[in-house]
Image (tube, rainbow, N blue to C red):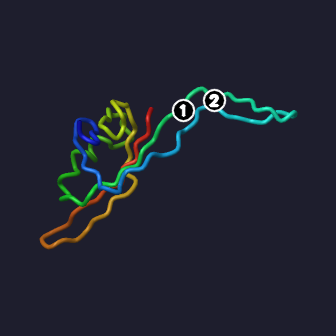
Amino acid sequence: MPFLVIDGITVPVSTSGAQVLPPERIGSSARTFDGSLRTTIRFEKRGWKFRTPPRPVADWSALEAAVAFGAFVDCSGDALGGTVTCEVTVSDADLIPVPGGFRKALTLTLREI
């Protein structure tokens, strides 16, 4: 199984470019007057951040179109441990000049829905 697949597109990931984000908790926790903990947390949602290696700019157009406007897409691969529906955002895009043009490296943030 590939390391990361977003909406059917296999996404290469830099060797040091994968990070698991702290879980997003749905609900809250608070201390009562006597010091005991009360919680209304019902769910935890996972998140990941991936950095891609520089690739030709055209290589990323299909991926950027698939995740535009916060669309929910199926994400899978060994990095996620199965298939997860995610909101994917391009949080950073670097254009790197090379002889004959540019290459683009993306930072992708995935949030489980």
Query: Helix, strand or loop at disc 1?
Result: strand
Q: Position of residue 36 (x, y in %)?
A: 80, 32
**Quarter-wise, where is residue 76 in the image?**
top left
Residue sitting nearer the eye, 52 or 57: 52
**Quarter-wise, where is residue 105 in the image?**
bottom left
Tally of marks = 2
Q: Residue at x 58, y 35 (%)?
A: 25
**Which residue position is annotated with label 1?**
44
Q: Quadrant of the C terminus?
A: top left
- Amino acid type of the residue tagged 1 in the rendering: Glu
Question: Compared with residue 27, is residue 17 higher up or lower down, i.e. above or below?
Answer: below
Q: Which mark is residue 34?
A: none
Q: Do labels 2 and 1 touch, CB within 8 Å?
A: yes
Q: Residue at x 36, y 50 (%)?
A: 50
Q: Position of residue 97 (x, y in %)?
A: 22, 71
Query: Helix, strand or loop at disc 2?
Result: loop
Q: Residue at x 23, y 51 (%)?
A: 60
Question: Compared with residue 93, is residue 101 higher up or lower down, i.e. above or below?
Answer: below
Image check: 24 left or right of 7? right
Question: Compared with residue 102, is residue 107 higher up or lower down, i.e. above or below?
Answer: above
The residues tagged by marks 2 and 1 sit, at their Cα atoms, a distance apart of: 8 Å
**Which residue position is annotated with label 2?**
41
Crowding around mark 1 (Cα neighbors within 10 Å: few <14, some 14 to 19, many 20+) is few
- Amino acid type of the residue tagged 2 in the rendering: Ile
Q: Position of residue 46 (x, y in %)?
A: 47, 37
Q: Residue at x 76, y 32 (%)?
A: 37
